[in-house]
Image: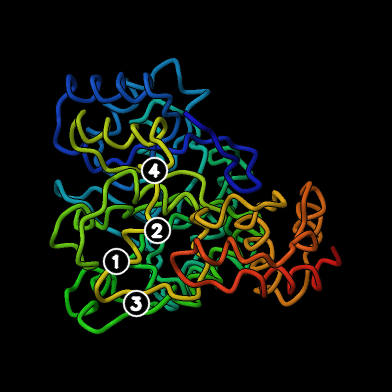
Amino acid sequence: MNYRELGKTGLKVSEIGLGCEGFLERDEAFTQAMFARAFEGGVKCMDLYSPDPDMHVRVGRAVGARRKDFVYQAHLCTLWQDGQYKATRDMREVVPAFEGMLKNLGTDYVDVGMIHYVDSAAVWKRVCEGGILEYAQKLKRDGKIRHIGMSSHNPDVALEAVRSGAVEVLMFSVNPCYDLLPGDEDVNKLFEDASYERPLFNLDPVREQLYETCQRMGVGITVMKVYGGGDLLTDNSPAGRALTPVQCIHYALTRPAAASVMVGARSEEELAAALAYEQASEQERDYAGVFASFPKMSWKGHCMYCGHCAPCPRHIDVATVTKFFNLARAQGSVPETVREHYAALPVKAGDCIACGACERRCPFGVKIIGNMRAAKALFGA
């Protein structure tokens, strides 16, 4: 298992994490077996969006003595009421629900306190002005949460929250179909067939800006909906072709700031399919050829950081140079951290000899030579 820094939190998370969907309405034996397989594969983080108290108790027992090395990403603003999940912004419900969650998990803190399901500007305003953000900040001061996060499906709202500086971790839906759609306050638009009936071209610019802003500001991204609820793994995929779990995970983990994919595995077999990413070959991880064949979707001219441009005869890491260039371009200037990372590269854009080998290999027709020249002009090397 590879481990990544979760933004600037100081936490290290496994590239493959656990979602909690597969643990709902299951028994102790199933929970213990799933965690045994997860621990064997090196998993050390989990998202707990559901407030189901029975699941929390079972998870807490399964984590047990590993708690100090295991990262809980648990949600504020969720409530278990009459045997059902409920999202709430009422502080009279938020506070006791969070305290009950800690008790059921058998812990006195969670590593990331995730403000749950903020998909509209109105909800974000209520979070900021209605006591929820203030409560999260108090929990952090009291040591009951270590870092403040937020979950969202809407890039417009997520970008506003990240820019506010209040959010240290963003849980966001990342996959190659959702990434082509503009932001919307109705999460169902991501799942509806009608959203994919017309041809779609290139990454939505707000989503691109969101990922690059998170990278620049040190906000770690944990990924949800990596398989699009399973749709991307079937021939009924919005893309028109089925992807493999490994391809979906690799796409998500090559986005700027992405640290961990929270996989909603419902069986040991599904968990094993996700864990197989860590031993997968470059060929198995490669999504570029499949993406280029999607009938109604195109990333023409847009760098997907897929690595098909390699190898460079001058040993330039073209994908990394392009990523730093895009980060700076999105900011409109060169942040000091980006400049330092670029300066540390052993071979830089200015070493490009314009041979065109990279452009001939690029499945998306990116004008790489032009990008290298622009990067040299921007960074001065």
Q: Amino acid at mark 4?
A: Gln
The residue identified by callout 3 is: 185
Q: Position of residue 326 (x, y in %)?
A: 64, 68
Query: For the residues marked 4 and 2, what is the alpha-carbon distance in whole angstroms?
Result: 10 Å
The 10 Å Cα crowd at callout 1, few under 14, some 14 to 19, many 20 or more, is some
Q: Amino acid at mark 2?
A: Ala
The residue identified by callout 2 is: 288
Label annotation for residue 293:
1
Q: Along the polypeptide, which appears first: circle 4 or circle 3?
A: 3
Q: Position of residue 58 (x, y in %)?
A: 26, 26
Query: For the residues marked 1 and 4, what is the alpha-carbon distance in whole angstroms?
Result: 16 Å
Residues at marks 1 and 4 touching, judged by CB atoms closer than 8 Å: no
Query: For the residues marked 4 and 3, what is the alpha-carbon distance in whole angstroms?
Result: 37 Å
Q: Along the polypeptide, which appears first: circle 3 or circle 2?
A: 3
Which type of secondary structure does the marked residue at label 4 adopt?
helix
Label annotation for residue 283:
4
Q: Position of residue 157 (x, y in %)?
A: 47, 73
Front position among marks 4 and 3? 4
318 is higher (above) or lower (below) than 374: above
Query: For the residues marked 1 and 3, what is the alpha-carbon distance in whole angstroms?
Result: 30 Å
